[in-house]
Amino acid sequence: MAKDHGAQIKNDTLYEKLRDDGALKEKAARIANAQANGSLDSGGGRLEDRSKADLYDEARAIGIEERSKMDKDGLIKAIRKH
């Protein structure tokens, strides 16, 4: 059973798995909470197959700065790095 990480973490099991896999606390929390509230895109599609507008929206949602200056490849790299 997963440890209770408090009210700020909505899916403790996924959070712990992501942390065990090396994800930073903030990133693990963001992914675990997105999965818990149903906003995580589970399509598993490749980023390269998505439109630039869709990538831009995701970059905005996760807080990537200077996204408006990026082309599609730049957005993909920034999303993967984040």
Image (cartoon, helix red, strand yellow):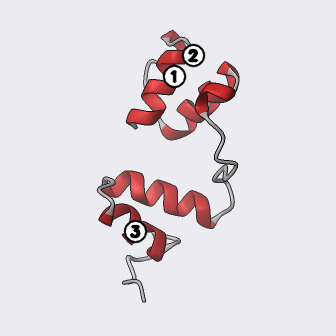
Q: Quadrant of the C terminus?
A: top left
| Proximity of marks 2 and 1: CB atoms separated by less than 8 Å | yes
Q: CA distance from mark 2 to mark 1?
A: 5 Å
| Proximity of marks 3 and 2: CB atoms separated by less than 8 Å | no
The amino acid on which the numbered mark 1 sits, given as a three-letter code, is: Leu
Q: Quadrant of residue 51?
A: top right
Q: Is 39 placed above or below 66 here?
A: below
Q: Residue at x 32, y 58 (%)?
A: 25
Q: Where does residue 53 sit, x and y in percent of width and height?
A: 69, 22
Q: Secondary structure at mark 3?
A: helix
Say which residue label 1 marks. 75
Q: Earlier in the sequence, mark 3 or mark 2?
A: 3
Say which residue label 3 marks. 17
Q: Where does residue 6 sit, x and y in percent of width and height?
A: 41, 77
Q: Where does residue 39 sit, x and y in percent of width and height?
A: 67, 54
Q: Is 42 placed above or below 77 here?
A: below
Q: Residues within 10 Å of mark 3 (few under 14, many from 20)?
A: some
Q: Residue at x 36, y 53 (%)?
A: 26
| Proximity of marks 1 and 3: CB atoms separated by less than 8 Å | no
Q: Is 45 placed above or below 76 here?
A: below
Q: Is 54 placed above or below 21 here?
A: above
The amino acid on which the numbered mark 2 sits, given as a three-letter code, is: Lys
Q: CA distance from mark 1 to mark 3?
A: 26 Å
Q: Quadrant of residue 28?
A: bottom left
Q: Quadrant of the N terminus?
A: bottom left
